[in-house]
Amino acid sequence: MWPCYKDEQEFNAHLVCRMCCMDERDRVQKKTFTKWVNKHLMKVRKHINDLYEDLRDGHNLISLLEVLSGIKLP
């Protein structure tokens, strides 16, 4: 069932609240996944600070895949 709003202002306030919650959830997930990646990359003495930037060129991503798979990639 869709919530009923008194007016547009109440609807907008609800949207802002939901967007803030989504932003917070995204921030927590990014931080959690970054820690998980670093836990595995420490095995090859590598570290990332920013999940999106530091995996962008593919080098750290390949290192992560090698650690997880146990196979050296070309």
Image (tube, helix red, strand yellow):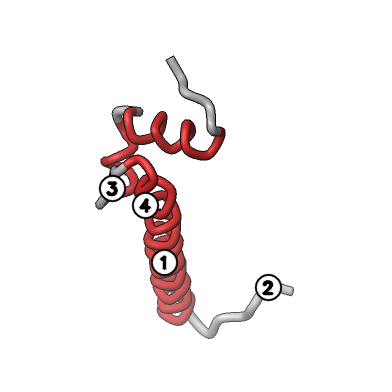
Residue count near mark 1 (Cα–Cα under 10 Å), binned few <14, some 14–19, many ≥20:
few
Indicate which disc, 4 or 3, sits on the residue closer to the N terminus.
Answer: 4
Closer to the eye: label 2 or 3 = 3
| Closer to viewer: mark 4 or mark 2 | 4
The amino acid type of the residue labelled 3 equals Ile
Kindly identify which residue carries mark 2.
Answer: 2
Q: Which is closer to the viewer, label 1 or label 4?
A: 4
The local secondary structure at tag 1 comes to helix
Which residue is label 1 attached to? 28
Instruction: Check disc 3 and report the residue beneath it.
Output: 48
Of the 4 image quadrants, the one containing the C terminus is top left
Residue visible at 39% across and 45% down in the picture: 43
Taking 36 as reference, is 63 above or below it? above
Pick whichever, 24 or 47, lies toward us: 47
Question: Label 3's element?
Answer: loop
Q: Residue furthest right?
A: 1
Q: Earlier in the sequence, mark 4 or mark 2?
A: 2
How far apart, in angstroms, are the residues tagged by discs 1 and 4?
15 Å
Instruction: Using the numbered discs, state the Cα–Cα distance from disc 3 to disc 1 in whole angstroms.
Output: 16 Å
Amino acid type, label 1 = Val
